[in-house]
Amino acid sequence: MTDRRQRTHAAPRGLPDAGALSKRPHAVVVGAGIAGLAAATGLAERGVDVTVIEREHYLGGRVGGWIEQHDGTDYAMNRGFHAFFRQYYNLRELLSRIDPQLRMLTPVDDYPLIDGAGRRESFRRLPHTPPWNALVFALRSPTFRLRDLVRLDAKAAAPLAAVSVPAIYEQLDHIDADTFLKSINFPSAARHLAFEVFSRSFFADPSNLSAAELATMFHIYFLGSSEGLVFDVPTSNYDTALWEPLRRYLHDEHGGRFCLGVSVTRVDSDSASGAGFGVHTDTGDRLDADAVVLAADIAGLQRIVAASPDLGDDRWRAHVRGLQTAPPFAVHRLWLDRPVAAHRPAFMGTAGHAPLDNISVLERYERESAQWAQHNRGSVVEVHAYALESAETGVSAEAVAQLHRMYPETASAEPVFEQVLIRDDCPLFAPGTHAPRPGIVTGIPGLVLAGDGIRLDLPAALMERAATTGWAAANALLNRWGVAGHALTTVPTTGRMAPLRWLAAHEDRRAR
């Protein structure tokens, strides 16, 4: 289904194609993650000459896929499970370029959450329409009782159910998610199971996550959208399902060029005189460009800006330096010599099983894993551990030990092959960081930013935030040239229930 209250943000008007300009502009997109690919698509489809530079040898960024070899066998690998929710409108719009029916995605029927006491939450067969989805979820939840509803501070909790973006950041960005939930008397068990699982999807503990981000996330996935908590996953590894087809689309149909395995070292700007930009790479090349989209991860963005002294004023550069990355996380994938029990879910979130955060059984939906599992009579299982205190690899072994406790049949299985990834390149949305977070428009003519760590005053998170900023970055450049942009779609920007919106506004005025 599609939410009838979804919000369409009109595209900038202008010429239908950049070919109608006196000179066809050339844009360099730095970074081929979701944000960079969305920006490249938005520009190339309007006739802009586009070059994409990516330091990895594959596309997709943190949602990229590649092949590992072991004993002469190819093993499909990526950085772990990603949920493609139905309200990821702008990401789905990008993927529709390679298949309007999105047949590369398949639904996950359910993703239970299990805490340390064995209590289990499920999102299966919930009503789609708010607030009935939340009410039914609460009524059947083992961690939320009627007495908890009575104890809830309804006035203080009103912003959670009446989110308005971007106003929610003025209300709650100063406080962390854990403190906020405690202040409204949200029950401890429910807080640790449901909200902690969601907050840790931002790769941070609730104590280090802005309450505004948590409230916005609750709005996106629950009370602000009737798309429900249903999500899809790719039917094969991300490279074959998503990004190679998109690369072919951009190259074959729009002349887009890709430079993989190349890092940008600095960007020279002479935009004041209209000369544009010089993009320097670690291969010694310089690419001249009329516009640049910096869609690198936070560390990459900071490195490029630090090496490019004529980009921006001191205030903007300080805001870029102030961006933070979340604590490390671990992905441990195991190709096991025997199958996981058939009744295990394809994906399960956990709380109270530190350091384990979730388990995926990949052969249930991913083609390469299914083929390997069938041929070897085994399973391909992945465990995630988020918000780690350090990047030590031993933590993944602890997560696997928790897998053995929860799925006992895996304890006697031997890994034919295994891969451990420890990364710390996800953005951190700590309290107080929204206002100084650099936005898409930089104040430097022809230079824009994109990525899930860039400020966006629209309700979007994670992969959808990356896609939305990418499209918006393309729109900003197209509008500068007088070329038509692309419409954006989001969940409603305000809560769906007028009484709660009034109560939240009243409480905000009283607090001021």
Image: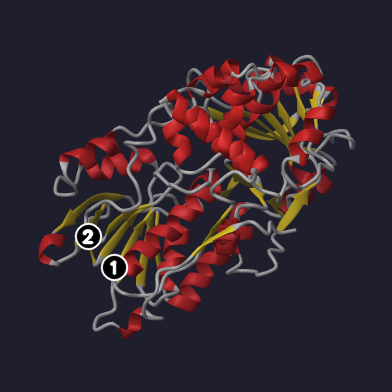
Helix, strand or loop for disc 1: helix
Residue 310, horizontal then vertical, whole percent: 14, 49
Query: In the rendered image, which residue does mark 1 sit on?
Result: 480
Q: What number is the disc on residue 451?
A: none
Toward the viewer: 415 or 462?
A: 462
Judging by the rendered image, the residue that carries numbered circle 2 is 445
Q: For the residue labelled by badge 2, is the local secondary structure a helix, a strand or a loop?
A: loop
Residue lying at 24% horizontally and 44% vertically, measured from the top left: 305
**Quick one: 379 or 122, which is closer to the camera?**
122
- Return the disc, 2 or 1, that comes first in the chain's sequence: 2
| Drawn side of residue 477 relative to residue 104, left or right | left
Residue at 77%, 21% (x, y): give it.
Answer: 144
Please rate how many residues cluster around mark 2, counting C-alpha atoms within 10 Å: few if below 14, some from 14 to 19, many from 20: some
Residue 186 horizontal side relative to residue 404, left or right: left
Q: Position of residue 214 (x, y in %)?
A: 55, 32
Q: Residue at x 58, y 51 (%)?
A: 492
Q: Picture coordinates of residue 231 (x, y %)?
A: 71, 48
Task: Say which amino acid is labelled 1.
Answer: Arg
As drawn, 364 above or below 291: above
Left or right, 3 with respect to 29, comes to right
